[in-house]
Image: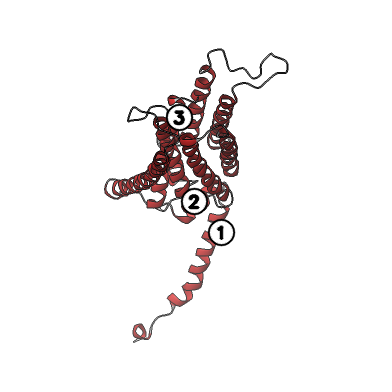
Amino acid sequence: MGDFIGHISPGLFLVFYGLYQAIIVSRALILNDSLLYPSYLSKNKGKWARLWQIAHAGWLKVVSGSLLIVYELNCVDEGLTFMTKLIPPRFMYPKEWQHLTMFILLTLDGCVEVVSKSVLKQRLVLLERGATVLGVYVLLLLLVSHVKDSSGVELQVHSLLILVVFLLMLVLTAELWAPEMVHLWVIETFLFLTMGSWLMQAAFILFRPVSGFPWEDDDISDIMFITTFFCWHVMINALCMLGIYGISSFWHRCYRPSLIPMGFKEVLFHKSSEGTFYKLLQKAEQQDRDDQAPLLSKSSPCDRA
């Protein structure tokens, strides 16, 4: 998988996943909606309701991970052998096995999300986020050992990627305790976009330079420009997220003005199968009306006159 396609394919997946999540987060911000329990899932009762309830992100992970696993298994001509038959035996294809481990965890993460959203009677958000965090933890460990024999340009490219994965690990870990905090979701989306776009850039830097000439490991200007390109990716992805938010805001305000935020009461009713929180809110509102009734029943001095 250490080739042009091996970097482009995961990068494309991460970019598409980041764009999809950017649209979801923008919609939640504009409509003041819940990120984990969107209002359209509970309000949509038409024939397309089942389609909206499909775990799109989960299936994207499953399909992408499965395709990457198949590609990894076929990228070695003589087969992905685990150990040699010599004495003493030696491990073979260490980087390819690391890639395979990453893609298996991606597929399992997607399976967990699909099962939680579409199969189980009650969605297990903690299980979904835990599977994603586990995958990122393993990804960080594999990347750290992945660059042991790298130097120069390749080392700088992967070091910047490791930085993004490390920050993503911190954000996803914080989401285990605050899964509805929109600020964390925005940062997570931005990091996924940055990781994807940088992987695609790395494919061109390492295997198909635009200039037609390979980058020089002993040229300090090449190392510095790699960091400069990474900073450009950071700025472009930030502008991309702002653009998605602006387009989503224009769309919802001009073409979908009838969409009203679900509100706190309906979110609580959707989260609880028994509607306990919603019933408590109804009782509290009824008690407030009962307390105000005597005040409203008293007539003013002007009315008596």
222 and 36: which one is in front?
222
Closer to the camera in the image, 300 or 81: 81
Residue 288 % position (x, y): 50, 68
Q: Is residue 192 above or below residue 13?
A: below
- How dense is the environment of label 3, judged by Cα within 10 Å: few (below 14), some, or many (20 and up)? many
Mark earlier in primary sequence (3, 2): 3
Residue carrying label 1: 280
Q: Residues within 10 Å of mark 2 (few under 14, many from 20)?
A: some
Q: Locate residue 119, reporting x and y percent.
A: 56, 33
Hey, what amino acid is under mark 3?
Answer: His
- Tell me the quadrant of the picture where the C terminus can be found: bottom left
The reply to whether residue 51 is in sight is no
Q: Provide the secondary structure element on which disc 3 rests.
A: helix
Question: Quarter of the image holding residue 97?
Answer: top right
* Label at residue 184: 2
Q: Nearer the viewer, residue 281 or 17?
A: 17
The numbered dot on residue 182 is none
Front disc: 3 or 1:
3
**Would you name the residue on which mark 3 appears?**
7
Say what amino acid the circle numbered 2 marks: Leu
x then y, percent, for residue 55: 48, 35
Q: Image point 42% across, 29% down: which residue?
A: 8
Gap between marks 3 and 1 measured at Cα? 53 Å
**Position above or below: 119 against 73:** below
Is any atom of residue 226 visible in this view? yes
